[in-house]
Amino acid sequence: MKIAIIGSGYVGLVSGACFADFGHDVTCVDKDPRKIAALNEGRIPIYEPGLDALVASNVRWGRLTFTTEIGPAVREADAVFIAVGTPSRRGDGFADMTYVFGAARDIARNLAGYTVVVTKSTVPVGTGDEVERIIREANPEAEVDVVSNPEFLREGAAIEDFKRPDRIVIGLDDPRADAVMREIYRPLYLNQAPILVTGRRTAELTKYAGNAFLATKITFINEIADLCEQVGADVQEVARGIGLDNRIGRKFLHAGPGYGGSCFPKDTLALVKTAQDAGSPVRLVETVVAVNDQRKRAMARKVITACGGSVRGKRIAVLGLTFKPNTDDMRDAPSLSIITGLQDAGATVTAYDPEGIEQARPLLADVDYAADAYACAEGAHAVVIVTEWNAFRALDLERMGALMAARVMVDLRNVYGPEEATRYGFRYLGVGRRRAAATAPAAPARESVDA
Ligand code: UDX
């Protein structure tokens, strides 16, 4: 199959490289000449484990090319994937469809022969209808079917998710488009991956419903974590206790500083708006959005409490800036609200992140960036773990404590437990761990279980 991918951002690039690796002939298109120039020189503009090698080998085999010219790529393609951004629109939170509809118009002008146009970007329900309308209006002769094929890629594990997906969802109404999609996903059909072929609107909504459900699960355990702190229970064990029920499942029950990233905050907001417009509000998701926003701000207060009620004039070491490990993505990262909250309360912040510092610099003013976790801790009155990078899982706590002005640890990812931290003399505050541990050495508690 010949495939054109419009938009060489995160989703476009990962999808393009993986489709090429399936054996297809893929052209990735982007309007940004600098991005295309970089890609043509073998530089990958995003950090995603394994992506550089996958791109390099498929480029070498001649199956993957990059261009700013949409015309030839679309004319030759059997399928054109729209993988441009759908950011939250300022003001109402609805997904901004400017880029998607712009891409539809650009595609329409260049269609030649039967082509399947696939929306891969996360798009509100009904977008497929609108994309089809735009294409038919701009090019009434076009032989085209519009299909929805949402991505479910996790940053940091995107290639694995693409090649060994939990499921593929394909929304279409025409058997000819079905045949093309089957050919494109042939290796996954052969591997008997679960593939749900359904209506276009159903596919579009499935993506939002999935992300909203996961965001709800996280928010649920976060609120249970707060309750654990008040009643002297341990959220890690509660999570394990409920997660072993197969109907609930163990995943996405890690309590923390609130979800962030490029998808959950944007997609929950867009679902709320779609549902309001449809006269069928999703009140549960509305609450999830509000609770998660409050939570990120509340985390700065947690640090202030751990520091005895004030951080004025104190230095706080923040470990981890990205919204999760194994990415350099700072979008809606909890670190942004936490650091700003601490600075507003009079603290000086030093931060370290293995991959995110360059992305963080323009977003966080007046932060001192350190070269590693220990340099970060030097002279600090508290160390705050915001992102659970592997590099922070086996810190030499004795060395770290010796460098600090005071041994206080706020562990917003429960990487350590009260027992371990207090062994090194730290005053420790985790998330949803027995509160007593913050003020006195913990009662002999069993070490945390992996949730
Ligand atoms: C998510 C979805 O998982 C993916 O299917 C979709 O296509 C895009 O959005 P991603 O944004 O890469 O992927 O991150 P994910 O690993 O899902 O984590 C999202 C946020 O939730 C992070 O801030 C993470 O720290 C937080 N999280 C996740 C928790 O706080 N607790 C958990 O148990 C799981």
Image (tube, rainbow, N blue to C red):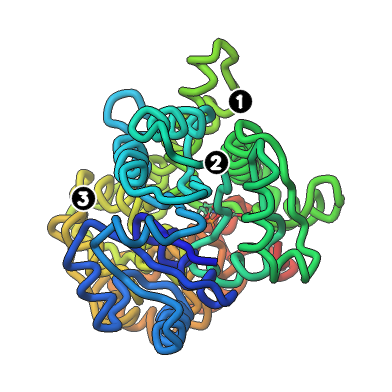
Mark 1, residue position: 284
Q: Nearer the viewer, mark 2 or mark 3?
A: 2
Q: Is residue 131 left or right of residue 197?
A: left
Q: Residue 266: give x, y in percent of width and height.
A: 42, 39
**Depth order, front residue of 299/57:** 57
Crowding at mark 1 (Cα within 10 Å: few <14, some 14-19, many 20+): few
Q: Residue at 47% of width from left, 33% of height from top?
A: 132
Q: Residue at 69% of width from left, 71% of height from top?
A: 187
Q: Nearer the viewer, mark 1 or mark 3?
A: 1
Residue 37 quadrant: bottom left
Please, what secondary structure does the residue beneath circle 3 have?
helix
Q: Residue at 80% of width from left, 49% of height from top?
A: 242
Please, what secondary structure does the residue beneath circle 2 have?
strand
Crowding at mark 3 (Cα within 10 Å: few <14, some 14-19, many 20+): many
Q: Along the polypeptide, which appears first: circle 2 or circle 3?
A: 2
Farthest top residue in view: 279
Mark 3, residue position: 343
The answer to whether marks 1 and 2 mark residues whose Cβ atoms lie closer than 8 Å is no
Cα–Cα gap, marks 2 and 3: 53 Å
Label disc, if present, on residue 145 of the rendered structure? 2
Cα–Cα gap, marks 1 and 3: 33 Å
| Quarter holding ligand 1 | bottom right
